[in-house]
Image (spheres, rainbow, N blue to C red):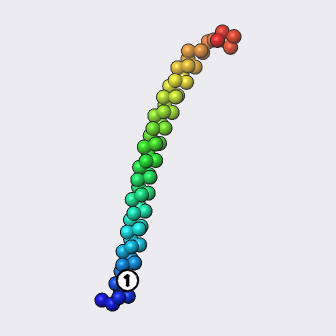
Amino acid sequence: MHKVDIDCRLEHTRVYLATLQAALERGERLGELEERTAQMRMEAEEFSKGAHQLKNKYRDKKWYQF
């Protein structure tokens, strides 16, 4: 093989590895985002339940009865 051929293959391998690394990092970030989204969804459901309970507790009260 010629030196130019080897250099070209080496450069292609470097680009391939860099692309692969970027894809793996992106996958990790997406996984973290999915976890945070699930956590936020659970917290929103808990907040909604608490707000609903509070609303029901004070449903028939007037502002001056608090």
Left or right? Give the position of 63 relative to 3: right
State the residue in front, 10 or 66.
10
Q: What is the quadrant of residue 10 in the picture?
A: bottom left
For mark 1, give the secondary structure. Answer: helix
- Relative image position of residue 25 (x, y in whole percent): 42, 57
Residue sitting farthest toward the top: 65
- Relative image position of residue 46 (x, y in whole percent): 48, 28
Residue at x 46% of width, y 42% of height: 36
> Can you say which quadrant of the picture contains the C terminus?
top right
Residue at x 36% of width, y 74% of height: 13
State the residue in front, 50 or 18.
18
Q: What is the quadrant of residue 64 in the picture?
A: top right
Q: Is residue 42 above or below residue 55?
A: below
- Relative image position of residue 14 (x, y in whole percent): 39, 73
- Relative image position of residue 34 (x, y in whole percent): 44, 46
Q: Is residue 3 above or below residue 44?
A: below
Q: Residues within 10 Å of mark 1 (few under 14, many from 20)?
A: few
Residue at x 39% of width, y 77% of height: 12
Q: Which residue is mark 1?
A: 7
What amino acid is at disc 1?
A: Asp
Residue sitting farthest toward the left: 1
Q: What is the quadrant of residue 18 in the picture?
A: bottom left
> Can you say which quadrant of the picture contains the N terminus?
bottom left
Residue at x 44% of width, y 52% of height: 29
Q: Is residue 30 above or below residue 36?
A: below
